[in-house]
Image (tube, helix red, strand yellow):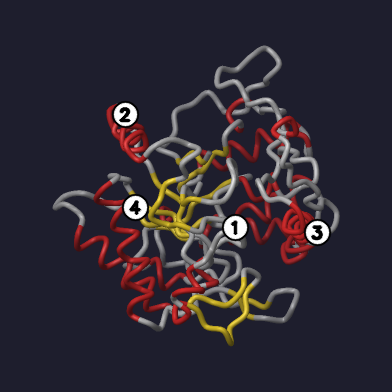
Amino acid sequence: MPLAQFPGERNWGYDGVLPYAPQSSYGTPEQLKHLIDSAHGHGLAVILDVVYNHFGPDGNYLGQYAQGFFQEDVHTPWGAGIDFNRREVRDFFLDNALMWLLEYRFDGLRLDAVHAIDNPDFLQQLAHRMRQQADIGRHVWLVLENELNQASLLTHDFDAQWNDDFHNVLHVLLTGETDAYYADFAQDPTAKLARCLGEGFIYQGDATRHGHARGEPSGSLPPTAFVAFLQNHDQIGNRALGERLHQLCSPAALKAATTLLLMSPMIPLMFMGDEVNASEPFLFFTDHHGELAEAVREGGAMSLPTSPRSMTPSDANAFPIPMPWRPSSSHARCLPTTNTHSFTATC
C-alpha cells in the first residue's frame, strides 16, 4: 500500500501529501531500501502502490505556493483537481515514479484509481518513461486500478489491471449481497462469471445500473492482463466490522472460489490472512482528528449501505491484534494443497 508521507502515525496510505518522502513513522529511506534488497535476496519482487490522482485532505500545502498545480474549476472529493495538462505537473509525478524504480529499486508500481486522472496521455507517458529508463533486461511491472475497464491501456503500456469484476461477481454468488456496486452483478451472476473467466472483464461497454457504458472489449487480451482476487483492503476495510469473506459465506463455497482463483490463468492476488482464513478484522483506519475524522467517518458510512465504514480510530487501542504469520490451531487453512503459478500478495 502507498508509502508517501501523511499526517499522523498510521494510515492506509491514500492520504499522502509528500510523494517523495517515505512515511517517517515506518522507518527511514535507507531501511526501506534494505527491506527491498532483502526481499530480492529471497526471490521476491516488491510492487508499490502509488496515488497520483489526488493528495490527502490534511497537510497538503502545495496549492498555497503552486496554485497552477490544480484546476480550481474541476472538483473532486479531495478538492480541486490536479492539472495533468501542465508539463510541470506531469513531470512531478513522472520523476516520482522513476525515483521509486531507480533509487529504491521497487520492481513495479500499482497505480491507484487512474480513472480519476483526466489525462490519458499521462498514463502512456509514464509507462514509456519507466520502461525506457529501466536497466536493460529488467522488467518493470505496471499495474492499474481502473474502474473504466480500459482494455486499450493493457495492450502495450501496462501489464495488468486489478479485475474488480472478478471480485464483484463472486462476492454476489458467495454472499448474496447486492447493495451498492454489487447491484451491477446481481442479474445472472453465473453467466457474468463465465464471461469474466473467458474474456477478462464482464463490463466491456455494457451499461451499468446507472445507464452508463463501462469498459472496452477485453477478449483479445492474455489472461495475465488481469489480477483476480476474492477480497482486498477495500472490500474488507470498507465494511463496518471489517469481516473477511470466510465469515460471510459457507466453507465449501469459499473453498471452491479459492480453487477457482488459484487455478485460473489470471494472476491471483491474496490479501494477508487469506491463506489461513484469519478471523482478525481489517478495519479502515486513519490518524485524523476533529472535524476531519468525523467527515471521513460519515463519508465512509455512505460507501456501502448495508455495511458502512463506521470507524476512523485515532486510539491505538482500537486496532485489532496483528495477525500471527504462522497458522495456529484456530485457523483453518483455505488454500488447496497443490502447486500453482506465481501469485501476488497485498499487505
Left or right of 281? Residue 219 is left
Q: Earlier in the sequence, mark 4 or mark 1?
A: 4
Q: Amino acid at mark 4?
A: Trp
The numbered disc on residue 38 is 2
- Residue at 80% across, 59% down: 298
Q: Which residue is mark 1?
A: 164
Of badges 2 and 3, the one in the foreground is 3
Residue found at the far bottom of this picture: 73
Of badges 4 and 3, the one in the foreground is 3
User: For the residues marked 2 and 4, what is the alpha-carbon distance in whole angstroms?
Assistant: 19 Å
Of badges 2 and 1, the one in the foreground is 2
Looking at the picture, tell me which residue is in the foreground, 332 or 20. Answer: 20
Q: Amino acid at mark 1?
A: Asp
Q: Earlier in the sequence, mark 2 or mark 1?
A: 2
Mark 4 in CB contact with mark 3 (< 8 angstroms): no
The numbered disc on residue 298 is 3
The 10 Å Cα crowd at callout 1, few under 14, some 14 to 19, many 20 or more, is many
User: Is residue 198 positioned above or below 204 on the image?
Assistant: above
Which element type, helix, strand or loop, lies under badge 3? helix
Looking at the picture, tell me which residue is in the foreground, 117 or 34. Answer: 34
Q: Which residue is mark 4?
A: 141
Looking at the picture, tell me which residue is in the foreground, 249 or 274. Answer: 274
- Residue at 63% across, 23% down: 333
Q: Earlier in the sequence, mark 4 or mark 3?
A: 4
Q: Position of residue 247 (x, y in %)?
A: 77, 34
- Residue at 72% across, 62% down: 185
Which element type, helix, strand or loop, lies under badge 2? helix
User: Is residue 45 positioned above or below 123 on the image?
Assistant: above
Q: Earlier in the sequence, mark 2 or mark 4?
A: 2
Q: Amino acid at mark 2?
A: Ser
Which element type, helix, strand or loop, lies under badge 1? helix
